[in-house]
Image (cartoon, helix red, strand yellow):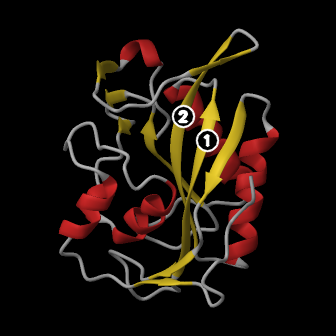
Amino acid sequence: MLGKSVNQQRVTSSPLNLKPETRNSKRFMLAYIGIGSNLGDRQVNIRRAIEALGSDPRNRPVRCSPLYCTEPMGKTNQDWFVNGVVSLETSMGPGELLEFLLSVENKMGRVRGEKWGPRTIDLDILFYGEQILEDADLHIPHPRLQERRFVLVPLQDVAPDLVHPVLGKSISRILAELDAEERVIPLEDGNEKACTV
């Protein structure tokens, strides 16, 4: 699953209105990361993952969505997930960010077995600034996010007007048009967030 070097990926500019920031002469891009867990203490796992993202000086979490209990897809005979989304300013390139996310998953005990199977933590790049990447191992925007209510609901919480660079639609519009029936339920207090930034 590790991506090839960014130089080997086809990069196409998009109309997404997000600008990189310059901080200490480093170029920062705004990325959106989907986070999920359905093994162990799911909320603790998500908080640990976000802390790991922010512990690297190349990253800074910007906003975190509330957390949701979500129905599993594909393999339904497993525990429900807890899902959320975090926006992250990063100076890592897309391939480097993917490798970093995989290292966080590995350190947290993620075991890659069956497809759609349970996982301690799952970290996915949803968007990376204005870029569209098409590679055998890395697609940005995430190629199935528009089909997944468990991604769109928390993504709408942090970026409702974000425009999908391929579909040309806002996250709010994509969610409103989604036919999928999967259940996405706010956690009990209705305002539980994965982090405060």
Look at the picture and state if 146 lies above or below 132.
below
The residue located at (32%, 66%) in the rendering is: 148
> Circle 1 sits in a helix, a strand or a loop, which is it?
strand
Residue 146: x and y in percent read: 27, 57
Q: Where, by quadrant of the figure, is residue 8 drawn?
A: top left
Q: Which residue is drawn at 36% across and 46% down?
A: 142
Q: In this view, does 196 lie to the left or right of 78?
A: right
Task: Name the residue tied to disc 2.
Answer: 30
Residue 100 to residue 6: above or below: below
Asked whether the residues under the numbered discs 1 and 2 touch, taking CB atoms below 8 Å apart as contact, a structural biologist would say yes
Q: How far apart are marks 1 and 2 (CA)?
A: 6 Å
Dot 2: within a 10 Å radius of its alpha carbon, few (fewer than 14), some, or many (20 or more) residues? many
- Amino acid under label 2? Leu
- What kind of residue is marked 1? Leu
Query: Height in image: 123 above or below 165?
Result: below
Q: Which mark is residue 88?
A: 1
Q: Which residue is pictured at 30% across the width and 20% down the height?
A: 13
Q: Which residue is drawn at 78% across and 35% down?
A: 56
Q: Give the SS element for disc 2.
A: strand
Q: Is residue 72 above or below residue 97?
A: below
User: Image quarter for residue 141?
Assistant: top left
* Residue furthest to the top: 25
